Image: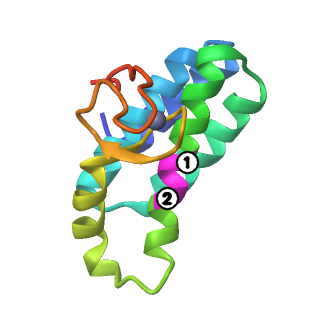
């Protein structure tokens, strides 16, 4: 499946009221888009994640906000004087880090417990 297909599926899941599934599919789309250096998917995923966050509660809302932040973080780097051909290197270095959903500190992508605040982190969708 292409990133565009995955975003379409994510939108369909969200339209059907399955926000958690939609977020998981959008994450998958973003991860695949990053492999191709496609920033268009990041924008679409960020917009979709905003919609999901605004219409959800609890874990789904939190996951959707994390996805939107993730996309925007990358898009900000791309639009901030970074050369287009360095998108992949930016993404590659950035993908090894993530933000703690509790205290927003940058932590290792593989961390299970935030070293700054002790928050227990669920692993990202495979
Ligand atoms: Zn933390």
Q: Residue 14 colored magenta? A: no
Q: Which region shows up in magenta? A: 69-73
**Taking 64 as reference, is 82 left or right?**
left
Q: Is residue 12 above or below residue 44?
A: above
To which quarter of the image does residue 124 belong? top left
Q: Residue at x 61, y 36 (%)?
A: 65
The N terminus lies in which quarter of the figure?
top left
Q: State the image coordinates of residue 111 (x, y, percent, origin top left).
A: 27, 32
Label 1 – label 2 distance at C-alpha: 6 Å
Q: Is residue 43 above or below residue 120?
A: below
Q: Nearer the viewer, residue 27 or 7?
A: 27
CB-based contact (under 8 Å), mark 1 and mark 2: yes
Secondary structure, mark 2, is helix
Q: State the image coordinates of residue 112 (x, y, percent, origin top left).
A: 29, 24
* Circle 1 residues within 10 Å: few <14, some 14–19, many ≥20: some
The image's mark for residue 103 is none
To which quarter of the image does residue 15 belong? top right
Residue that badge 1 annotates: 69
Q: Is mark 2 within 8 Å of ligand 1?
A: no
Q: Nearer the viewer, residue 5 or 81?
A: 81
Residue that badge 2 annotates: 73
Secondary structure, mark 1, is helix
Q: Residue at x 54, y 23 (%)?
A: 22
């Amino acid at each position: 499946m292409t990133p565009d297909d995955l975003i379409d599926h994510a939108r369909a899941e969200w339209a059907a009221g399955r926000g958690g599934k939609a977020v998981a599919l959008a994450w998958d789309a973003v991860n695949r888009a990053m492999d191709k250096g496609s920033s268009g998917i990041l924008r679409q995923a960020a917009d979709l994640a905003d919609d999901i966050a605004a219409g959800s509660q609890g874990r789904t809302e939190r996951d959707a906000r994390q996805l939107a932040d993730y996309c925007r973080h990358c898009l900000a780097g791309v639009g901030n004087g970074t050369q287009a051909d360095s998108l992949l290197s930016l993404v590659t270095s950035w993908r090894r880090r993530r933000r703690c959903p509790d205290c927003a500190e940058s932590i290792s992508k593989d961390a299970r417990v935030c070293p700054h605040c002790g928050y227990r982190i669920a692993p990202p969708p495979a």
